[in-house]
Amino acid sequence: MQGWFFVLILVLTAGALFYVGRSRAVSAVGGDSTLLHSKPGFHGAFVMICGIVPAVLVFFTWLLFSRYLTNAFVASQLGADFANLATIEQQALMRNMRSFANRTDLSALGAIEVNAVEAYRSFVANTALALQAVVAVLVIVGSWFAVRAISKDLRARQIVEKTVMVVLIAASGVAILTTLGIVLSLIFESIHFFQKVNFLDFLFGTHWSPQSAFEGVGEEATGRNSEVFGAIPVFAGTLLITAIAILVAAPIGLMSAIYLSDYASPKLRATAKPILEVLAGIPTVVYGFFAALTVAPFFRNTGEAVGISVSSESALAAGLVMGIMIIPFVSSLSDDVINAVPQSLRDGSAGLGATKSETIRRVILPAALPGIVSALMLAISRAIGETMIVVMAAGLSANMTVNPLEAVTTVTVQIVTLLVGDQEFDSAKTLAAFALGLVLFCVTLLLNVIALRVIQKYREQYD
Amino acid sequence: MATPDNEHIVTSYEDELTSLTRAISEMGGMVEVAITNATQALIRVDHELAKQTANGDKRVDDMQRLIDEQAVSMIARRQPMAGDLRHIVSAIHVANDLERIGDIAKNLSRRTLHIDSQRVSKQLYNGVRHMSDLSLQQVKRALDAFTARDSKIAIDVCRRDDEVDSLYISLFREFLTYMMEDPRNITDCTHLLFCAKNLERAGDHATNIAEAAYYLETGGNLYNDIESGKVSLG
Amino acid sequence: MSVDANLAATAAQAPADKAGKLKMSGNGVNVFYGDKQALFDVDLNIYKNQVISLIGPSGCGKSTFLRCLNRMNDTIDVCKVTGKIVLDEQDIYDKNIDVVELRARVGMVFQKPNPFPKSIYENVAYGPRIHGMTRSKDELDDLVTSSLRRAGLWEEVKDRLDQPGTGLSGGQQQRLCIARAIATQPEVLLMDEPCSALDPIATAIIEELIDELRANFTIVIVTHSMQQAARVSQKTAFFHLGKLIEEGPTDQIFTNPINKKTQDYITGRIG
Ligand SMILES: Nc1ncnc2c1ncn2[C@@H]1O[C@H](COP(=O)(O)OP(=O)(O)O)[C@@H](O)[C@H]1O
Ligand SMILES: [Mg+2]
């Protein structure tokens, strides 16, 4: 409730400041706004920025740090009583203090807790007042200076544009920092893991059975863990399934893209394309049970009929269904890039007597190659990251095999199984998930880099 | 048929074409006055007027240069086509012919200065005056044909050129008779004969102008068309 | 004077008469885009080893007519062509005609240079490869070289045949497209505003090229530049609102057009 109230006040203030700045600018030139260096709206925005931005910055800074300040204040109030507590007890005290702050009945609490709650209450009340006062003063002072600065020649436009740029930079900064944060946390956790398990053993080991990991420390644990955390079978499974998926999706997707873009009538294209895209919207769990309950048994029965043993959970079933799932990624994106190849190239080719399929093979596809490769890359990333279908259709056993009829497992599935369950958070088993994640991340990064290189090398630029 | 009665999309081009036509009319007016004055001076043996007329030819020359420059600049800048191209090219031709007619007026005036006013009998002048009237008429009509883009008038001017020619031949005989009658007439008659010849040349220039007018309107060559029977003078 | 004029007239018509063998002709050509009729009953003769230019305001159907001549309109679904178009006494809209072969015989160069995003060599070799015109690599090399030579591009590109054609300048690209078109050894070359994207020098080079190509090809060129039509062509046809208004020797069209619409168009008046 309070939050909404705050937002409402903020909006109203901003509107008012804008209005004040605007009218002030107009009156500064006696009503003839053409005399202003910047349009009145920029002056309004200028005053609004000067009034609101510092206040909001202070407010959010406070939000970030208030927790620590509060704790410090309460601790200082409690003095030695608090300092004598163990860390865990201190943390519990702070939690209780916050949860009891809104209750009137404090009879269930001990003396030190009551003291803490009271200190907390007074601190919050005072600081809230102070904060409101500071914010109000900032708004008033900021906008006052801004209003004073308004004149015929004030370059309000430049200032506003600068602010806009800063906001945009901040937005992209958030995205970049988040990525960086994720990568860093992956790296740190993985380092913990590699302290327990040898890096090379992990990377090149051919045996994966984390269930038999040895908890504890010492020579024995290291030796044992180096044997059970060999990531190769997992990655082999991922590659196998991804390869099957791409083998299914690339030709089908590409061909349907070619049909849609160059052969289908516009009307057919307008209906067929969205229908194909619906495939991408089906939840993967639905694909999963489709794979497990329909496709896999079908393969097993067919296999039996011709005398080949097919396990009931096979890489083939999972890869096939996954391939179907990523068809729309390939077809829709490829269709767009094929369509983006200029008509003039098609005309040029037809004008030389090439048939439609010759034109497509010799001119359109080479010209659209970079786009097609990135469509495939996107599909591959999607396939590598896919979990649900594999869990349901390919199984959990980490077999190192290239036989698509056997059960395999993938990186993502293993990450899920490692993290589900109640292990200690710093056990080798849990940390292995981070290591797997890190390697997966590196592999996809590498794939992307290679794809970019390929595109740069073979791209046929058409403008 | 191909009369460009539509306005040009580029107005300044249209203005330039109009100003070219106006310059031709103005030059035509100057030349007509010059011929009239020269004839007057000759008949009245007015040396003063003759001098004035002879000096006035410079303006006609300047005018021709101006029209040439205008036309060249238009060809360079506008790349005229079809009717416009013919307009500009024939303007150059017409200006050239007008300049020559101006020269003829100057020539007449110069001769006037050599004729002794006392001795010449008035009757000698009648034929020359008639000649002058007829040639002037031809020049005027040819210019009309040009400015109005009227091929009928142009054909008419060509037809009438024969009249000028026959008048000249009869004048030639007349002067010959006078000279045989009295050898003292020889000097003046020779002068007058040259004057008549000059006026006959003016008539020829008038037909040239008429031909240009015909080309301007039809794109054809008048004499070719007469020969091929497309146009009959009869 | 009249004799001179006669001489001039004969001189102007001389090439027209000498080369006077009929190469292509359209008879009562109507073209419809869906319900909209774009060409009305066009009759036009195209003579061997002549350049004929099609002029007219935008949207008057010049490109449409041009595209009828090698059946490029087939690629447009809604486009319907009636009437008769003949190439060497053969109806090109006949059922037995192979469009692929027709387009090899009637080549086309487009308004915007559209080299394929391939190497210069591959661009020129494209047509011969498709039509299987050469028996060996050497033969193909020779064909590519001679086509580039004839297009006046050889000297400029002989050291970089393996570089992309799209890296050339606009004028060079257009000459590459001409080389590409003549590599299939067509009999007729259709050019749709081939110089409209080029600077004056590149334009002059291409005009010179057209003049040289005339010895071996019959050329139909669409142009918006009156001067260009006047410079390169022996015959000119003026289209207006889908109708062929006037056609005749270029000299006559540009000095003394018969039709008032033609006159108004080429002198830049409101028609
Ligand atoms: N693909 C098309 N679909 C529908 N109408 C078209 C198409 N191409 C051309 N047209 C129409 O046909 C007419 C002639 O076009 P076009 O031949 O391209 O003119 P030009 O080349 O003379 O500028 C125009 O009115 C145009 O709108
Ligand atoms: Mg066109």
Image (tube, coloured by chain):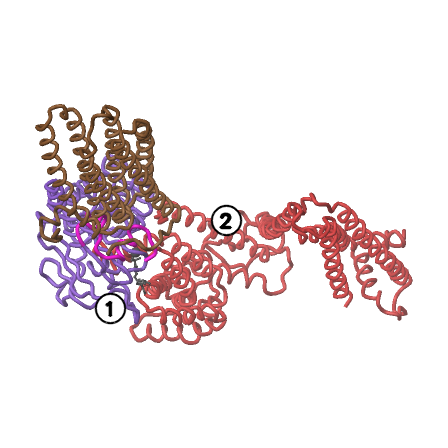
Amino acid type shown at disc 2:
Asp
- Which residue shows up at 50% across the image and 71% down it? A283
Q: Is residue C131 left or right of residue A343?
A: left
Residue C127 appears in the rendering? no
Q: Position of residue B5 (x, y in %)?
A: 32, 55
Task: Residue C241: give x, y in percent of width and height.
Answer: 29, 62
Q: Nearer the viewer, residue A190 or A342?
A: A342
Residue A78, picture quadrant: bottom right
Local packing at callout 2 (Cα closer than 10 Å; few below 14, some 14-19, many 20+) is many
The residue segment tinted magenta is C248-271
Chain C: its colour in the image is: purple
Q: On the image, numbered disc 2 is attached to which residue?
A: A201
Badge 2 marks a residue whose secondary structure is helix
Judged from the image, the quadrant occupied by ligand 1 is: bottom left
Q: Foreground mark, 2 or 1?
A: 1
The Cα–Cα distance between marks 2 and 1, rounded to whole angstroms, is 71 Å
Residue C270 is one of the magenta-drawn residues: yes
Is residue A271 in view from this perspective? Answer: yes
Q: Give, as a three-letter code, the residue at label 1.
A: Lys
The chain letter corresponding to brown is: B
Q: Residue at x 26, y 68 (%)?
A: C32
Choose between A395 and C187: the one closer to the eye: C187
Q: Is A335 positioned to the left or the right of B178 in the image?
A: right
Position of residue B148 relative to residue B76, above or below, is: below
Spot the red chain and give its letter. A
A199 in relation to A18, above or below: above
Q: Which residue is disc 1 drawn over?
A: C80
- Check whether the beta carbons of the residues at disc 2 and disc 1 lie within 8 A of each other: no
Q: Secondary structure at mark 1?
A: strand
Q: Quadrant of residue B197?
A: top left
Query: Which chain's residue wears label 1?
Result: C
Mark 2: is the Cβ under 8 angstroms from ligand 1? no
